[in-house]
Amino acid sequence: MLIRRAPEIRPAEITPEPLYLGRRAFLSGLAAAGVALTLGERRALAQGLAREGLARDDDTLTPYDVVTTYNNFYEFGTGKDDPSANAKGFVTRPWKVRIEGEIAKPGDYDFDDLVRPYQQVERVYRHRCVEAWSMVVPWLGFPLKDLVARLQPTSRAKFVEFTTLLDPTRMPGQKSRLFPWPYVEGLRMDEALHPLTLMVTGLYGKPLPPQNGAPLRLVVPWKYGFKGGKSIVRIRFVETQPANTWQVIAPDEYGFYANVNPAVDHPRWSQARERRIGEFYKRPTLPFNGYADQVAGLYRGMDLARNY
């Protein structure tokens, strides 16, 4: 996968947002504008988009207004449209991230200082929710492994724990007793170090909206979406497996790993098929959300029906 870094892209090369809704829409937009393309030029454009992360022909981008208005972020409410409605005015500056545990460089990091050393890259990832709906999102961020290398974990660091902001005055959903707040998620160290694991600061080339986890969230594309902790204020490197929130609430339904596995049903519904937002039909769910070639080796020898 070729990832072009922001400084390498000239303004004239940036596709206008209305045309940025997928490969077919992009080519159709050129045709509508009267731009004649040869077959070779069309193929070259399609291949260029694929190099930016669109791995399959059916990976049309989910529109920005859908990505930002249909999502789970229970800190702002349990309805799919609650986050966009209740996160209006959510202030993300100043923002501190406490980083601690089995590392050489613990401390309270200002968000801007934390992300400044890293050039932002755009990656188009499939996003699969355990509720059997999915999206294709162009995320903006940097690999988590780069941050881990900077922090210098010790040999005792086996897992990484991520904690979301606890502030019921600004996050009205936290006033309910639905969860043992704050929200906590975790990864095994080799998962955290995988090149696909992304610390996200934006989407569609724009800063991350509050309803999508501003200013900093985690995206692990081969796992169900609940693994992606949002509005992160603490990162902790630990020796033992953290107790992630959904596993604490419903251990018979949600495990620590949360790898997309169509062969293992949720106790209340099948995971064998999914509905891409904006489509009326369901498609087969792919093992590891279609990233098996890249990540299956992390789980070699594990029983993925028990380690769900």
Image (cartoon, grey):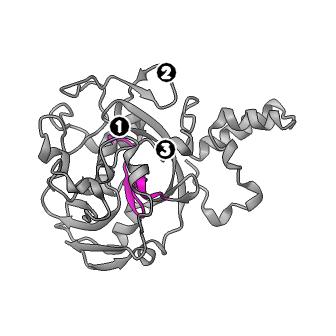
Where is residue 272 shown, x and y percent of the image? 32, 22
- The secondary structure type at the circle numbered 1 is loop
The secondary structure that dominates the magenta segment is: loop
- The answer to which of marks 1 and 3 sits earlier in the sequence is 3
Q: Which residues are magenta?
A: 208-224
Residue pointed to by mark 2: 280
Identity, as a three-letter code, of the amino acid under mark 2: Phe
Relative placement, left or right, of 294 versus 1 is left
Image coordinates for residue 68, horizontal then vertical, percent: 48, 47
The span from disc 2 to disc 1 (Cα, nearest Å) is 17 Å
Dot 2, how many residues are within 10 Å of its Cα: few (below 14), some (14-19), or many (20+)?
A: few
Name the residue rendered at 33%, 39% in the picture.
Answer: 296
Q: At 42% across and 68% down in the image, what residue appears?
A: 91
Q: Position of residue 128 (x, y in %)?
A: 38, 37
* Residue at mark 3: 67
Instruction: Please give the residue where the numbered disc 1 appears in the rendered image.
Output: 129
Q: Nearer the viewer, mark 1 or mark 3?
A: 3
The residue at 73%/39% (across/down) is 44
Q: Amino acid at mark 1?
A: Cys
Quarter in which the C terminus is drawn: top left
Q: Is residue 289 above or below residue 3?
A: above
Q: Earlier in the sequence, mark 2 or mark 1?
A: 1
Q: What residue is shown at x 84% (from left), y 32% (from top)?
A: 38
Residue 199 sits above or below residue 56 on the image: below
Name the residue type under label 3: Val
Q: Nearer the viewer, residue 46 or 1?
A: 46
Q: Taking 306 as reference, is 225 above or below it?
A: below
Between the residue at mark 1 and the residue at mark 3, the CA separation in whole angstroms equals 13 Å
